[in-house]
Image (tube, helix red, strand yellow):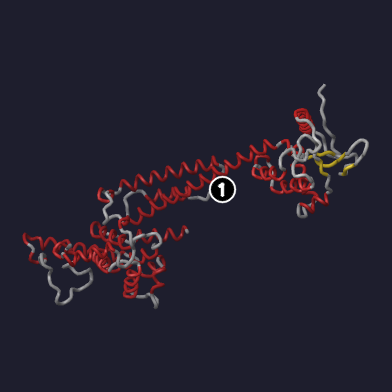
Amino acid sequence: MIEFHWNSPFGARPISAALMRREDGVRRAQARLRAQKPETDDASGEGPDKWALLRALTEARQAFGLSDRTLAVLEALLSCHTPKRLDPTQPQIVFPSNRELSLRTRGMADATLRRHLASLIEAGLVLRRDSPNGKRYRRRDLEEGDEAFGFDLSPFALSADLILEKAEESRMEARTVRRLRTEIALCRRDIRKILDAALIEERAGDWASLEAAWRGVAARLPRAASSVDLDHALAEALALRARCETLYLSTLSEQELSGNAAQDERHYQSSKPDSSSEKSLEQRREENPAGAPRSHLSDPPFGVEPRAGDETPPGTTALGSMPNGKGAATRSETDAAAARRQKAEREAPDIETVLSICPTLSDYSREPIRTLSDFEKTADLVRGALGISADAYRAAQGAMGRYEAAITIAALLERSDRVRSPGGYLRALTAKASGRGFRVQPMLEAIRNQALRS
């Protein structure tokens, strides 16, 4: 016959085999510990620190299926135990009344107290030791010794090793979740930067499908997502970033991959109006006008008439006197470029649309911007505030057209927190406009999408 050491509950509370085995296991574990360690007069220094153990249980509460209010009830029970440490070799019985427990749990109702006490007993952290009449009290008998009825906290002390192990697992899981969330956030940002750059630069490729896929990857993760769920999300984000990188790099030319300063704004370190890079370029043109490009010396900007008294610089030839018919070819190229600029200006959005997408430009104008002249004057003022030289702006006007150059300045102002060198960026856009044309619509669309996302 198997001998069990257990106490039957009072009143209508039923008995179960699990409760009998749990209480019997606690009694046997205490007997083994008492046999291994000799008894001492003062056992208050033995056992784990109850408050440190409660903190560890708070970290591992999900592993035990406990809520925060259940832990508040356990804290109230521990506060009724005078010593700081719990001796696992002896019953550690506390006997507070329901009213006292309610006060120590900040006014918790009796029904709520009973529910959370049942959760602690079900988790195997507390045992109930009921008196014959169901009351909780302590009886002192000089001959037979003290006897108490209430809640036994010794199972909590006996579970110290398991609680500390689960707490460490919970901390490791939390660190893993934080790391995965950080990697997912960085991966999402990388994808967004690539998509923005591809839209602004009008790169060839199916960027619409990648944009739709990014929206799925950028969906908000559940707050209680596990490390397994985050692993799947990170794998999906990494795969999408690899697709975006591969497609973007495949559209770059050899000149762009070489890191030429004319194509990559990273070579422009200063954004001051008199930056060394732009000043040196102007000084070289003044010192050696013969070696300067013709588009900056003899040809006036688009829409600007040449001033009286201007002469052709030494070492250059007027367009009409170029030998072997090169003047006619150059004029045809100029006419084609002018036609492209006029077409781009016709397709460009109106001023109201541009100001709705780039509202910061209006802050630099004393009066409301209503006409094209107001818009271009404000853009020229902003150009100086961004540190873009007059020469770079004239070159942009000649390549893009006056209106599109002003729109580009408004877009650069709107993204000034993300563009390190507006002057270098404008020169790169000017080079693209001179080569295969430049349209501002994708750049404005990217700014609008960014505003909607934020």
Specify whether 369 is left or right of 310.
right
**Quadrant of the image containing the N terminus:** top right
The answer to which of 280 and 449 lies nearer the viewer is 280
From this viewpoint, is residue 387 visible? yes
**Horizontal and vertical percent for residue 383?**
32, 69
Residue 219, relative to residue 342: is it above or below? Answer: above
Q: Where on the picture, by quarter, is residue 86?
A: top right
**Labels in figure, total:** 1
Residue marked by disc 1: 222
Within 10 Å of disc 1 (Cα), the crowding (few <14, some 14-19, many 20+) is few
Between residue 385 and residue 303, name the one nearer to us: 385
Can residue 21 be seen at all in this image of the molecule?
A: no
Q: Residue furthest top?
A: 1
Q: Residue at x 67, y 38 (%)?
A: 163
Seen at 72% across and 43% down, the residue is 50
The kind of secondary structure element at disc 1 is loop
Q: Position of residue 179 (x, y in %)?
A: 51, 45
Work out which residue is located at the far front of the displayed protein and give it. Answer: 41
Residue 33 position (above or below residue 254): above
Asked whether, in this view, residue 107 is left or right of residue 276, the answer is right
Residue furthest to the left in view is 324
Residue 147 picture location, percent across and down: 88, 39
Amino acid type assigned to the residue bearing label 1 in the image: Pro
